[in-house]
Each structure stands twice: as C-alpha cells, then as structure tokens.
Image: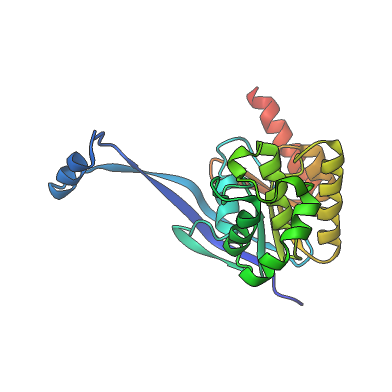
Amino acid sequence: MNPPVIDAQGIGLAYRLDRNRTGTFKEFAINMFRGQVEHDTLWALRDIGFQVAQGEIFGVVGPNGAGKSTLMKIIARVLPPTEGRVVVRGNVAAMISLGAGFNPELTARENIVLYGALLGRDIKLMRERVEPIIEWAELQDFVDVPTRSFSSGMVARLAFSVATDTQADVLVVDEILSVGDYSFKKKSSERMEKLIADGSSVVLVSHSLPLVRKMCDRVMWLDKGDVKMLGDPEEVVAAYEAAADARS
C-alpha cells in the first residue's frame, strides 16, 4: 500500500495579537525593552489530523473563519504550523489567492518565470514554457505588458495557467474554478479533470456544496479551527447544512 501523499498530525497554528497600541516603532521598542508588550494568542487551527491518499479528492468545508485558508497555506508550505507536523510527498501546485506572488511592475513574461520559481520549478524550464502558458491563458497580446495594467481576471487566468502547466502530485485548490468567463471556466475545469485523471491528489476548499458532493471522495468539516466531522461527502455535507440551518 502506497503511503499517503499528505499526512497531517496534530496541526495547530496560532496568531499572536498584540494588546499594546503604539503609534511608532520607537514606542513599541521601548515597551518591549521594559517588558510591557502584552499579547493574546489566537488559535486559527488546533489538533487537526487527516491523510490524503494518492489520487484522492479531499474536500474541506466550513463557514468563514473556520481555518480553511490557513490549512491550505500550511499544506502548500506557505505557513509553517505552530505545532504538529504535515508531510507532503511530491510537488504541490497551490491555487490559493491566484496571482498573489506576482510583481505588478514586472511583465507577464517575467512574472511567469518568477511565479514558477516560487512554485519550486526550474527557471530555465519556466523560460521555455512562457509562450505555451501565455497562449493557454489567452493573453498573447499582453506577454510584455506590466501586470499592473491587467484586470484581476487576467491575473487569475495567468496564475492558473502557470500553476497547472505541469503535472503536480498535489493540487491545493481554493475556489478557483470560477476564473474567467464561461468558456474559460469550462477550459479550466477540463484541465483540472485531466490533472486529476492523471493521478494528482486534490485538496479542495469550496463553499459550493453541490460541487463538493459531486467531486470529493471524502470531506472534512472545519469550524472555529476544529474538525467537526470527517468522512463520506454526503453525510458530512448534510450535517454541515443542518448545522448552518440551525444557526440561521
């Protein structure tokens, strides 16, 4: 039996919230020197454990503030956990806040190389892949234009094209199937389906419960940083819907 591509054990992540309100860095430094800096600890996640098998589509649902985006960033190796450990076997394509790694002063061509490097890809390979990536994103007329002049949709299309240009072992997907117009959404969905068919494992965060029911093999329900339920998509989504209806 193959080991899981994602193995998370006791993951927790805490944010430090300073109580002292200082107007300048000098005031903050003086307070810290005097031992007068106080802070609270906010746990965005606590004691999260799960595994994702090769080729599995693992869904994550929960209300806003449940810790879903924080979990995605930990899996994508953007944030280190405060406690616990997560092992991700293989390369990761993270589709979280698409385009967040772009420099608006650089051209699309330059950002493709930069974004690819941030994803851990070879710079020489990324230079060779510029034209196919631009063509797939349907941005041929903008390859040497600074991305500060791009619309948010153009940025997302370019970032999606870079992120999915190579076969990844793990796809971390956060509500990105809404990129672009109808034809581009269809094109994006088809590319995602091909990556999955070719063996990529997927961690999918979505508020679209019909999509979660349709696509996922298992689902985890997060609420206030804790796992409320993990298992069959139909059972977990039904329980989540019932809880949401009870609160409303």
Image vertical order of residue 233 relative to residue 152, above or below: below
79 vs 188, left or right, is left
Spot occupied by residue 60 in the image (x, y as percentages of width and height) = 68, 47
Q: Nearer the viewer, residue 42 or 34?
A: 34
Q: Is residue 193 visible?
A: yes
Spot occupied by residue 229 in the image (x, y as percentages of width and height) = 67, 47
- The N terminus, quarter of image: bottom right
> Looking at this rendering, what residue extends furthest in the top direction?
248
Residue visible at 77% across and 49% down in the picture: 140
Image vertical order of residue 6 relative to residue 27, above or below: below
Q: Nearer the viewer, residue 144 or 10?
A: 144
67 vs 166, left or right, is left
Q: Nearer the viewer, residue 110 or 35?
A: 110
Q: Is residue 57 visible?
A: no
Task: Determine which quarter of the picture holds residue 86.
Answer: bottom right
Q: Nearer the viewer, residue 182 or 231?
A: 182
183 vs 134, left or right, is right
Task: Determine which quarter of the picture holds residue 130.
Answer: bottom right
Spot occupied by residue 33 in the image (x, y as percentages of width and height) = 14, 49
Q: How is the image coloured?
A: rainbow
Residue visible at 76% across and 43% down in the picture: 177
- The C terminus, quarter of image: top right
Spot occupied by residue 230 in the image (x, y as percentages of width and height) = 69, 51
> Looking at this rendering, what residue extends furthest in the bottom direction?
1
Residue visible at 87% across and 51% down in the picture: 190
Image vertical order of residue 206 relative to residue 12, above or below: above
Residue visible at 82% across and 38% down in the picture: 210
94 vs 140, left or right, is left
